[in-house]
Image (tube, coloured by chain):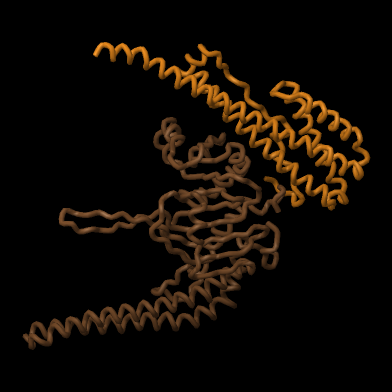
Chain colours: A brown, B orange
Amino acid sequence: MSGTGETDGRTATEVTVEGFEQFYRTELRPVLEELEGRRRRVLQTGAIAAAAVLGGGALAVTAGLSGASGNALPFLVVGGVVGLIVAIACVSAASRRYTKEFKERVIGAIVRFCDPGLHYEPAGSIPRDVFRGSRIFQHSIDRYSGEDCVRGTVGATAVEFSELHAEYKTTSTDSKGHTQTHWHTIFRGLFFTADFNKHFRTATVVLPDVAERAFGWLGQKLQGLSIGRADLVKLEDPEFEREFVVYGEDQVEARYILSTSLMQRILEFRRRAGCRISLSFVGSRVYVAVPCSRNMFEPRLLRGAPDLKAATEYLRDLQFALGIVEDLDLNTRIWSKQ
Amino acid sequence: MWIWIIAAVVLLPGLVFVLLYNGLVFKRNRVESAFSTIDVLLKKRYDLIPNLVATVKGYATHEKEVFSEITRLRAEAIKESGHTDRSVELNNRISELLFGIMAVVEAYPELKANENFLHLQRSLNEVEEQISAARRAFNAAVMDLNNAVQMFPSSVVAGMTGFGPRRFFEATGVERAVPSVAGPDGGEP
């Protein structure tokens, strides 16, 4: 890779273990040690709150057992509940403050270390219309949230990614007339978008293949009938066809985008991700959805902050996302789009 | 009751015949459409050749024969339309010569700094890859049609209505070896 997004001649995916360890020792560790005091204070707040609630509870039980005045017991119970709510609010506020500062100072520093051209927003996310516009997921969204957004340029490619959680709801009513709302996940994981290196006008969507794997030839026929999707594009790479199903508005353009080398690269990326990835190519951009139930880039309150292993995990998650540029070879600019 | 059974016995095969026949026509039309896309893209490539020759011949003066041959082949290919053996042969030869010209350019650093040439090189890379995509789409359409022509029960309808299998497009040695012309950074698509 070459281009503007390099740091001392290296890129995000080329960061060495030694280089990161040195960065950890000189820059990250002092910050983590400072944050360690805050982490302990959050835990102390939690411990005090828990002790107060337990003490209050014990007092109420004792009062109840000793046959204290009937007037005092309700006050003790109400007081206990209020105390519990206040304690939870205190701990949660302290934890949020710690998480915010940790992300800004630690994750932000790791992002800048990977590539100074990148900008990190802990509370930012890929906008809902961008997610919808990718055309990977067709279900209407009722609840949408995201965090840990990284934006910037890697080599010649403008990239943006964040964690996302998109859900829809259903309601059911039981025989007694009670209505219950159920939330269902449409997508949860890492959502990545980048400027693609070729011009194209139409949309092409690459989804994990379920039908063909399960039902073979009949499954392929069923894929052709998929409602709301464009035409089925049958590609010549049998391994790619086994893993993915492709829908495209233009048969030629879908193949122009999915060159034989890109199909191989997507297969390799699929193996590296180890999960059912989806991609789409819309408006000269590529969108990649990597499902993941794990919450990335989060501090661990129960573990000491100065932790090289944890810091290396943040780096790996970041490299995984930034590595998509190299995985899909987005920096090769030999066509008329530069 | 009997009328309905007789009507079903008569109408059902007719309906199946119509559906299978329409399926074959749809697949044949897709092959024709895929072929015309290749034709359009080949014409796009023909349009780039005069500019390329004009830009390169000022630098690569020793390659006069190559330039005159590619110009002649281009003129001939424009006249020769359709999926004929001659047309395929002409275009294969044009691909080989274009690849040769791009290889020769490596010996002329001043040409690689020429903005006009770089733009032509990018456009050529793009059209070459589009042609390759169109040929893959054509082969996929031919495969669909050939499957329908050779597989039962559509093979029966194909035999009765004169549908035959079509020939696949085969990549030349140059196209197999070189997916596209290497760019200024030496990258491959």
**In which quadrant is the N terminus of chain A drawn?**
bottom right
Q: Is residue B28 above or below residue A117?
A: above
Residue A47 at what x, y percent from top left?
Answer: 31, 81
Q: In this view, does B99 lie above or below A38?
A: above
Instruction: Please report the residue visible at 50 percent of the width from the left and 61 percent of the height from the top.
Output: A127
Would you identify the image quadrant in which residue A52 lies?
bottom left
Looking at the image, which residue sits at the far right?
B61
Residue B183 at what x, y percent from top left?
Answer: 75, 48
Residue A134 at what x, y percent from top left?
Answer: 52, 52
Instruction: Please report the residue visible at 74 percent of the width from the left and 44 percent of the height from the top.
Output: B123
Foreground of the two, A306 or A44: A44
Foreground of the two, B108 or A21: B108
Q: In this view, does B136 lie above or below A82?
A: above
Q: How many marks?
A: 0
A57 with respect to A220 (left or right): left
Would you identify the image quadrant in which residue A331 lies?
bottom right
Q: Can residue A212 be seen in this view?
A: no
A302 with respect to A243 (left or right): left
Instruction: Please report the residue visible at 6 percent of the width from the left and 85 percent of the height from the top.
Output: A67
B185 with respect to A164 (left or right): right
Q: In this view, does A136 lie above or below A52?
A: above
Residue B97 at what x, y percent from top left?
Answer: 81, 34
Q: Can residue A302 be seen in this view?
A: yes
Would you identify the image quadrant in which residue A249 lies?
top right
